[in-house]
């Protein structure tokens, strides 16, 4: 089968197209004939071994696929962390979800990682309450574009989106954000308060890191919550002192999707059921961000790292 393999860590240049034997599913796994694989910003960290989970070589990158099982089921699934950039992959049955008729490949892939992440950020980590102000950084991205829509649907009083270009900010507004802020502003604290009518904000969803995180923490209202779920800037925020949290009774927390599969009550399955339902009802839409073939995977990672993309990117392993 055709696959993308990494034999040394680094940037986009380490992604190579190769021919490999088909994978053999283990106990509790199922083989998927891949129609599309998801491309995520986290994959760029995976390629350079700077992700939360340390990687080993050789490796087929990627964590999500949509395709068909040998018994004819159309599923969208998370892999065990790697193996998605290939024509076939073995996935755990526990992380495979049957795709309803009427949900296309791009939408299914948007939901299984980015959609469930947005759901968990708002429902489990931030505990969003009706009327609260929600800041969504990188609002035109895969998670951000869905989080904007979910926050509005679940009663946010005001959604403030940040993005780096006029086009991306307009997309966030089209998705339901009340106001859009340039993410390149020098003082994000003042920008967020100004966007909220001079008031501090209640919830911040942050996958940027660096100064954006530091300044967003300083914009939190009493009992405000910042949920940190990525570091696209590749810059560490400053350490948060517990005493500084006391000043506004603020909370800074983190969320990493794999941990959600360990929660009781099949939480991720509940999230997927609700997200599929919203899509079928026309209340939630994925934003297609572009499709790449195997030969274009290096360019895909270059585009991701340069923040030139919006919405959901996918890889077509048939070309």
Image (tube, rainbow, N blue to C red):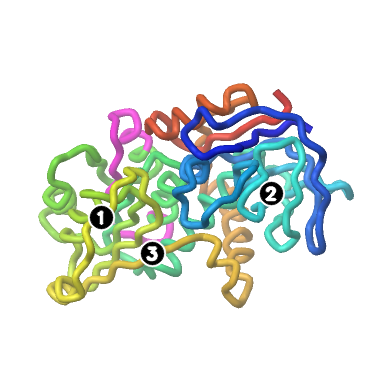
Residue 203 in percent (x, y) is at 29, 62
Tally the numbered discs. 3
Image point (63%, 71%), residue name: 266
Q: Is residue 234 magenta?
A: no
Q: Which mark is residue 254?
A: 3
Q: In the rendered structure, which segment of residues is drawn in magenta? A: 152-171
Residue 98 in percent (x, y) is at 74, 53
Viewed as shown, does residue 274 lie left or right of 100? Answer: left
Q: Which mark is residue 119?
A: none
Q: Are marks 3 and 1 in contact (CB under 8 Å)?
A: no
Q: Earlier in the sequence, mark 3 or mark 1?
A: 1
Q: Split into 4 quadrants, where in the image is the C terminus? A: top right
Q: Is residue 160 magenta?
A: yes
Q: Which residue is mark 1?
A: 237
Image point (20%, 63%), residue name: 220
Q: Which residue is mark 2?
A: 76
Instruction: Relative to 175, say whether 126 is above or below.
Output: below
Residue 19 in percent (x, y) is at 76, 30
Gap in Å between the C-alphas at discs 2 and 1? 34 Å
Give the SS element for disc 3.
Answer: strand
Give the SS element for disc 1.
Answer: loop
Q: Earlier in the sequence, mark 2 or mark 3?
A: 2
């Amino acid at each position: 089968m055709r696959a993308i393999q990494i034999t040394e860590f680094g940037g986009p240049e380490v992604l190579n197209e190769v021919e490999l034997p088909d994978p053999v599913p283990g106990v509790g796994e199922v083989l998927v004939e891949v129609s599309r694989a998801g491309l995520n910003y986290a994959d760029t960290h995976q390629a350079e071994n700077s992700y939360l989970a340390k990687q080993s070589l050789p490796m087929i990158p990627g964590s999500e696929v949509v395709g068909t099982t040998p018994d004819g089921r159309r599923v969208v699934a998370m892999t065990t962390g790697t193996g998605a950039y290939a024509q076939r992959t073995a996935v755990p049955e526990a992380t495979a979800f049957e795709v309803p008729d009427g949900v296309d490949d791009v939408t299914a892939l948007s939901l299984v990682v980015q959609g469930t992440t947005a759901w968990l950020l708002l429902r489990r980590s931030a505990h969003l309450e009706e009327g609260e102000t929600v800041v969504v950084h990188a609002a035109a991205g895969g998670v951000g574009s869905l989080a904007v829509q979910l926050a509005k649907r679940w009663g946010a009083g005001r959604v403030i989106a940040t993005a780096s270009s006029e086009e991306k900010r307009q997309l966030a507004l089209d998705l339901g954000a009340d106001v859009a802020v340039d993410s390149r502003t020098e003082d994000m604290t003042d920008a967020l308060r100004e966007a909220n009518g001079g008031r501090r904000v209640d919830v911040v969803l942050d996958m940027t890191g660096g100064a954006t995180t530091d300044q967003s923490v300083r914009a939190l209202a009493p009992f405000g919550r910042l949920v940190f779920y990525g570091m696209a800037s590749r810059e560490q925020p400053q350490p948060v002192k517990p005493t500084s949290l006391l000043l506004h009774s603020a909370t800074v927390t983190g969320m990493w999707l794999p941990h959600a599969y360990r929660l009781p009550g099949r939480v991720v399955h509940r999230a997927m059921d609700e997200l599929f339902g919203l899509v079928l009802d026309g209340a939630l839409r994925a934003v297609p961000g572009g499709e790449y073939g195997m030969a274009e995977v290096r360019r895909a990672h270059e585009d991701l790292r340069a923040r030139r993309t919006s919405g959901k990117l996918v890889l077509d392993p048939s070309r």
